[in-house]
Amino acid sequence: MTQTVANRLKIGLSACFQHADPSRSLFTNKTLQYVEQSIAHWLMSSGALVVMVPCPTGETARGDANLSHYAEWLDGVVMHGGADVWPGSYGEMPLREAWVGDRIRDLYDLALVEAFEQAGKPIFGVCRGLQLINVAFGGTLYQDIATQHPNALQHRDPVSYDQNYHDIVLVEGTRLSQMYPELVHARVNSIHHQGIKHLAPGFEVEAWSYPDRVPEAIRRAPAPGRGYIAATQWHPEFHRPGSPINTVDDTAILHDFLDACTATRARSRPPVHTTPGKIRDRASRLLRQALLRN
């Protein structure tokens, strides 16, 4: 049955950034915010309407729309993949200049997670999104798996990119394993060099890379008053059902997130006000608050 526009879920998608660059010939010295189309199309495959949530601050900022307005209006948000997370976001100094990440995007992403958490709306993370969620709630990351995790698999290949794969093992008894009752081992793409080192309190690992055991899927443990938060280290939008690589069919993961958005919309929950310190509290918190307000 065809969905009416009013019945379709409205899903926010966090923005990727290309910062102002005077040497760029197109949009010279302008900040670009954008989405990669595969993830938008993945969300749209089940009928959802997808809206990029732009960062409301910056030298060109105008008007009074803020991230809290988007969190109130939308049914859920997906945290996009992309640049490294700045190590300062989890209390470390970059071990190499190449791993400095994108602090400006971190501030925006942390504020976006905080806005949807306060509104009680579902949050799903992909790749960087998983790492950012883990950091937001008090976890830490390997700045580089290859140098910090002994005997690690090759989690990123710049040549093969989304055609780089490895195995995962699902954790018995988790929600993810219940979604795939006949599946213990699966194959996923791997496009990252950072990963979870210490898991955020209140979260559980739902899948590990195999055999080197880097967290590949996480979920916040359900509890009264807690909204839905889940994430995968792999990119589900890059998997194709029926692929000869025999990757996991991520349709169940998408439906699990969208079902949570539907249930949250039906409940019309009042905003959940985050207790102090629930989202990682560092010197950048004041900047994140400014993003929420402005």
Image (tube, helix red, strand yellow):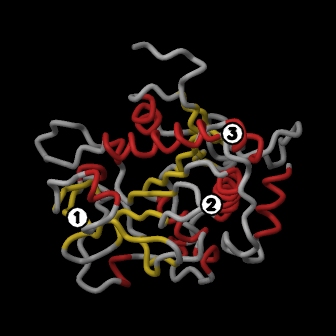
Amino acid under disc 2: Gly
> What residue is pinned by disc 2?
225
Q: Are marks 1 and 2 in contact (CB under 8 Å)?
A: no
Of residue 131 and residue 117, the one placed in the foreground of this image is: 117
The answer to which of marks 2 and 3 sits earlier in the sequence is 3
Q: Position of residue 207 (x, y in %)?
A: 30, 66
Amino acid under disc 1: Ile
Q: Residue furthest right?
A: 63
* Residue at (47% x, 67% y) in the render: 221
Q: Position of residue 273 (x, y in %)?
A: 75, 60
Q: Position of residue 241 (x, y in %)?
A: 21, 37
* Residue at (39% x, 42% y) in the render: 254
Label 1, label 2: how far apart the Cα atoms are = 31 Å
| Dot 2: element | loop
* Residue at (42% x, 31% y) in the render: 41
Q: Quadrant of the N terminus?
A: top left
| Residue 181 quadrant | bottom left
Label 2, label 3: how far apart the Cα atoms are = 46 Å
Q: Are marks 2 and 3 in contact (CB under 8 Å)?
A: no
Amino acid under disc 3: Thr
With respect to residue 210, does 162 lie above or below? above
The answer to which of marks 3 and 1 sits earlier in the sequence is 3
Q: Residues within 10 Å of mark 2 (few under 14, many from 20)?
A: few
> What residue is pinned by disc 3?
28
Labelled disc at residue 168 = 1
In front of the other: label 3 or label 1? 1
| Dot 1: element | strand
With respect to residue 126, does 171 lie above or below? below
Of residue 288 and residue 276, the one placed in the foreground of this image is: 276
